[in-house]
Structures are given as structure tokens and as C-alpha cells.
Amino acid sequence: MRDDSLPTGPSRRDILRLAAASALTLAVPGRLAAASETPVADSSVSGPLHSAGVLAFGPDNVLFVGDIAGGALHAFSLRDQDLAEQTGVELGNFHNFEGRDLVAGLDQKLAALFGTTVDKIVINDIAVHRPTQQVFFSVERGRGPDAIPTIVKVNRGELEILDLSRIPHSQVSVPNEPSASAMLEFDPQRMYAITDIEYYKGEIFVSGITNQRFASTLYRIPYPFNSSMATCTVEIWHPVHGEFETRAPIIRHVIRDLNGEPFLFAVYGCTPLVRFPLSALKDGAHVHGDVIGELGYGANPLDMLIFTSPADSKDYLLVTIDTRSASQIAVSELASAPPEPTGGHIDFGPGGLGRTQRALPIKAEHLAILDPKWAVLIWRHPRTTWRLDLSTLALPYFFERKDGMSEMNWPNGPDPFDYRDHHGEIDRVGHLLPA
Amino acid sequence: MKSPVTDHPTLRVNVDPHHDGADSVTLSCPGPEFGALLAGAARPADLLKSVFRVTVAQNPSEESPRLPGVSGRYVFLEGEIQFVPTFPFEPGVKYRTTFNLSGIESFPAKEPVTLDFAISPKNETVEPAVVTQIFPSCDVLPENLLRFYVHFSNSMRRGRAPEEIALFDSDGRPVDDALYRAPVELWDRTMRRLTVLLDPGRLKRRVGPNVALGSPLKAEQQYILQVGSGMLDQHGRPLREPFRKQFLAGEPIREPIAVKDWQLHRPTAGSWQALALTFSRPLDRALALAAIRIESEDGSVIGGQVEVDRCETRWSLAPSSAWSPGAYRVQVSSQLEDVCGNTPTGAFDRPLRASPGAATEHDRISFAFRLV
């Protein structure tokens, strides 16, 4: 017993209370209950979300979140205190195509943080705040109707849960269809699964698939959300060999200026890659896109994005696919590709998009671009398939040298990239090895 | 409730009496030295987190030793510190809470205090879930069928549909690549109804997969759609048993819904009889329930109980008040579909229209009738 440390005067109980009171002001952010109040579990971190799905960053640190259960698109204006610079975090040895794990066992750590088991952690999407290079995820605890939605970010290897109840927020209902079709509006069983969102010059483009009608609606929603302006809905059709037309829900889309004109590239659930001039996507219109390729049967597009190759400074469209390698196509070819190739898969010949097409051995559940040299992905390493990792992967080949066999490993083998000069500079978890 | 005055730290779980998930853990009598330590610490919140934490006991700790503790906040009460988790403690999950000062340098070595607990699940006696029905209910379905609806008796969990729901041929062999794996499982709001689509790429004529593999179903063949018992309800329990729907594939239907061919079975004016519409072929059940309504002359909707039955070839409305004589309209949304995705305004895949920018499909189709 350390009586010598106790000040004289007040009783021991008073000291405890005093110490607690001062700890009160120093220690704990957030609400503090008085002794008689029953504290409430803090699921207020979910804020206005009913579910947490696709993510996209907009202008001015706005994070857009698709909320399927809530039938809404949310915009959270992240404040300075919600973001932390991640420059200086070691990303890997770019010279040797060696990435590193930013968070090993991501699903295990989320489960531990959320007070649950790994099978109840669902990571729905990943988005990178490019100015800070901070990585954000939408995560749900639970897989049933009462799943708890959250947004989690990575701060130098640590996972932090955003308190969405404190972040300035606005939202708009999606779907938000014109009253003529409002007959279906009040069906409580109808759900619109938002599968992709993208901000482009003052608008958010939302695509998805419903659980009822086989709808092909694309939404153009002005942001900031403004109740006086109607959401544009566009019905998307694609022609088939000049004979048929068919509607299709868009699963992924990406918008890109080509030769000064903006285009939207869409991947459907039934595999074609279709191009639309943005100017054609007017409210209420039925628009036929140009089919410029096909992904092939059984393929589910996971992520679709455009990146600039650090090797040749050209832009490439990348589509990651769940059952096989990703597809990569030069953006310059997207503009010039003739509509309706002769049929068949996207790895096709001189007539279509095949000239610069590559199959990339990426097995990512989620992928995003982190900076000009690195992508970040959520994946299972072949040797640790029981857990998900958040790792970096060098552009433009998306090739992790440490996991592959390479002639550069042999002492007398060819070494065009001077690997042997840089061998062993950095280990998997990012420690600079002693020279 | 004040804890009994002791002079050593103890832990207890406070179970929310209303079972609303507001459970928490309390550390009593951490000791005055600890209070002083907190007050004097440079980062008291971090210190508190490192010595008083709750972890999930059943997560494997061997492979990943540095798992974080359960996220939460601390509440200072009289003589006690309470840990309130960010998300409610989950019933059935084993937690361990520890108060461990042994890592603190200037402290006398003390045994850590540990408490293992789990919140017991509610609703243990609820029956396991079953599939109650699969629509379309007919046992002859068109070769170009677009979707099934699988109805469950309880709310379910997402995640198992691709591996548990499969199509088999009459020899019991799986039919590969016939069902579409949606990017998100297509549950309704209550998670009791799942939409299962057949692969649209194979359904649409002349699209790549259709050319490569043909349509998912072949006319005159028998099939079984099976829902495996590995589907989990919202409490994590499997189905009581698997469910199988056997059907024969018939001729494809590649034309719009012919609303003009519907038969109207008029009720008598002044009665409470149901009004019925019968269709020449089955419609999509969910859309039929929502996409058809009866309006009176002034445009107001006639309320009542809507039903779809007879293998989804009949729609009926039992009115909430007696029918007045007069003029009425049947209003049909152009978004109504049959089981193949054909709408009143066009087939699922249909001949190319000359001018694609033509009228939108938010029109309604309607026809008038009178009750006398």
C-alpha cells in the first residue's frame, strides 16, 4: 500500500472521485452518463445509414454512400478531424513490384473491434481519399435484416470507426421515380440494390439492380442534393447485332472524357461493355449504347476503374472479375472501338478491343487506386486464406513479385529490372531490413 | 444499484433488463492508486484502453496476436468505470473482459482480474426456417424463364445463396452457369424473399453467352430448383430441410403482355364481390400485386385486399367498400412483367426500334369498364 503517495486531507473515497472527475475531463471523448442514467450502446456511429454499400468520393471531401436498406444515397462532408494524412506510410518496394500489407487480417481485426466473429463481418466497398491517401471501407456487422452499417478508415495501420452521427450529412431517396410509375412506389418488398455510384461534374450517377422488375434505370442526381430538381432517370438498352434491343441493369460504370466529350462506360449483368455519350443520357430517355465488347459468360464485374500507367503514362480501363483474371483495355481504344464487335469474349482479335487487352492475375475482392504507383486491394493471400488482408499492389502490372516464381530469383537468370540490386530491401510487413 | 464496497477490483456484466442490447461491463473499485494514475497520465484514454478492455474470446488469437479490443467508451460513475461497447454485445459470442495493471511500471504487481461472459440469445424456441414457396408456382415454366422468388418462413442472412441454390436436370446433375450471381443478393426488405434470376446473358438471343452456351433451360426437359438447408436464418441456424421445386420447361414466350386479352370478371354494382382479372399466361407475382389497380371515374384508387393466385394467372381485388355503379378503369403499369421479363409494351428482347429516343416506358395501359 503506497500511503506515501496519497495527499493528506480528503478521504480515500473522495480522492477516487476527484481522480475520476479529473480523468473525466481528460480522458474520454463522447457522452458521459451521470450515475443514475442507463448508458445506451452507441450504435449512433451508424448515423443515418440503414446499410453501408458502395462508396465514392466527391468534391470537397464528400463521401457518398449507397444505402440499399434505407433506399437512399448519402453525402457525408468529412471534416478535417475525420481525415488524416497517410503520406509517409510505407507502401512497398515499387522497383521490385513488392507490395506490403497495410492491415493484415483485416476481417479478423474488424471482428475483434466490432465485438463479433469473422463470419459476421461484411466488407462491401473500398474507397481512397486521394489527397490524404486514406483508405475507407463500408462494413456491416451481421448479414440479416438487422445488420449494423458503419464506415471504417485506416490510419497508419489502425482501424478507426467513423462516428457518422457527427458528420454533416445530406441524402436523397433512390429510387426516386417519376409519379407516373409511382404505382410501384409503395411496394414494401421492392428493393433497389445500388451497385455503383460515381461523381462527375456536379452529378452523382447511380446504377443498380432491383429485386423485382428487370429494370435498366440509371439515375443522374445533381449534387448538392436539391429537392427542387428532379432526378433524371434513363432507361438503358443495348442493341444486339442490329436486330434486337434489350434492357439491362448496369452493374458497374465509369465516366471518362474522350476527345473532349464525356462518355459513360457500363458493364451489365449480361456481360456487354457498352459506351454512351453522356449527352444522350437525358431524363426519361431510352438510350441505346454502343456495345464495344463482352466480358464473357459467368463473369461478375467487381470493380471498374481507370488508372494511368506509370510505365507508359497512358490510361487504362481495368475491370476486376470474380471468377477469373481482370481485363485491362487502353482508354484510347474505348473511344475508337467500333460498335458491336463480331461477337465472342472481350479477349478478341484485331477488330475489337483486343489489341492492348491484358488478362491480369488479380484476385481481389475489392480494389482501388491509392496513388500514381500503387493500387490497394482487399484479398486473401494463397498461404493465409483464412483471413482477408489490405495490401498494396504495384501498378501497372498488378503483379506481386514475392508471390510469383521469377527467373530473377536465380543467381544467373535474366534480371532486366535490376532486381538483384534491390533484393531484400523491404520485407512483407514493411520493415526496412538492415543493409 | 451500488456495488458492495470492496477494496479490490471486481468486474461485472450489466445485462440490459429490456433486452435492447444496452449491455455493458463495469469495473468496480479499481483502486485510488489507479484513479491517481489516470489523472496523472499523459494519455489517460489510451492507458484506460490498455488496462481495462473487452475482447472477443473465440476469435483465434494464435495467428493474429495483435487483435484490437472491442470498440467502446468509458463512463465514470461513483467508484466505478463502465465500459459501453460501440455496438451491442452480440448474443452467443463469448467475450473476455480484463483489468490488468501488470504492464504498468510504477505499479505494484497485481493479478489481473478477468471475467468471461456471453449474452444469452433470445428466441431459442423459434422454429427453424423453411422455404414456404417458390414462385412461379406453375410446374410448367417457359424455356426463357427469367426469375424465381424463393419465400422463407423467417428472416434470413445473406451470403449463402450462390452455393445453396442450384438448378439440376432430371438426372440430378447440376446445370452449370444457368443462375445469375447477382453482385448483391436480391432480398426484399424483410429478408424473407429472395429473387433468383436466370442468367440474362444466356436468355437474350444472340448475346455472347447465349451464342456460346445456349439458353439456360431447354424446352421439354425436366428441372429441379433446389434450395439447400445451408441457407441460414437471421439467428444463424440452417433450414430445417432443403426444398425442391420440380418443373418442366415449355415453349419460350417472346412477346409483350397482351393486356387486351385479359378477361375481366365484373362484380355486381352494390356488392362486395371481388373483381378479378385473368391472364392468358402467368405473370410475375410480385409485380402483379403492385402494378395493377382499379380506379374510379375521378381517378381515386379503389382500396381493398389484392390477391394473385391460380399459378399467377388471376388477380383479384376484394374491395373495402361496396362497389358503386359507374365507370371504372383498370390501370396497368408498363413496368408489369411476366415470368420472362416481357412487359405490356415490349418483349424482353425485342426487335430494334427505329428511333431509340422514343416515348418512355412510364406510360400506363388502361381500359375502362362500367358497373351497373
Image: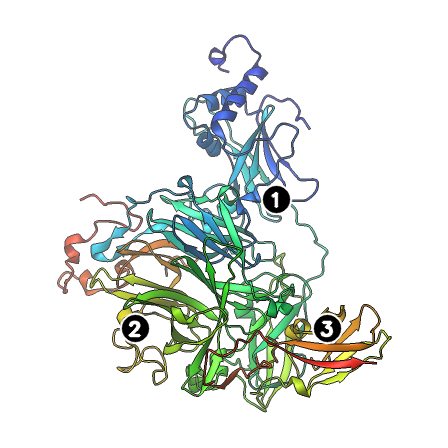
The label nearer to you, 2 versus 3, is 3
Q: The residue tagged with tag 1: helix, strand or loop? A: loop
Marks 2 and 3 sit apart, C-alpha to C-alpha, by 50 Å
The x and y percentages for residue A395 are: 27, 60
Q: Quadrant of residue A344?
A: bottom left
The x and y percentages for residue B339 are: 61, 80
Q: Kindly identify which numbered label has been placed on residue A175.
A: none
Identify the amino acid type marked 2. Ala
Q: Quadrant of the C terminus of chain B?
A: bottom right
Marks 1 and 3 sit apart, C-alpha to C-alpha, by 56 Å
Q: Which residue is mark 2?
A: A335
Q: Residues within 10 Å of mark 3 (few under 14, many from 20)?
A: some
Q: Kindly identify which numbered label has been placed on residue B118.
A: 1
When the figure is inspected, residue B124 is found, relative to residue B213, above or below; the finding is above
Q: Residues within 10 Å of mark 2 (few under 14, many from 20)?
A: some
The label nearer to you, 1 versus 3, is 3
Q: Is residue B141 or residue B14 the one in the foreground?
A: B141
State left or right for residue A183 relative to residue B67: right
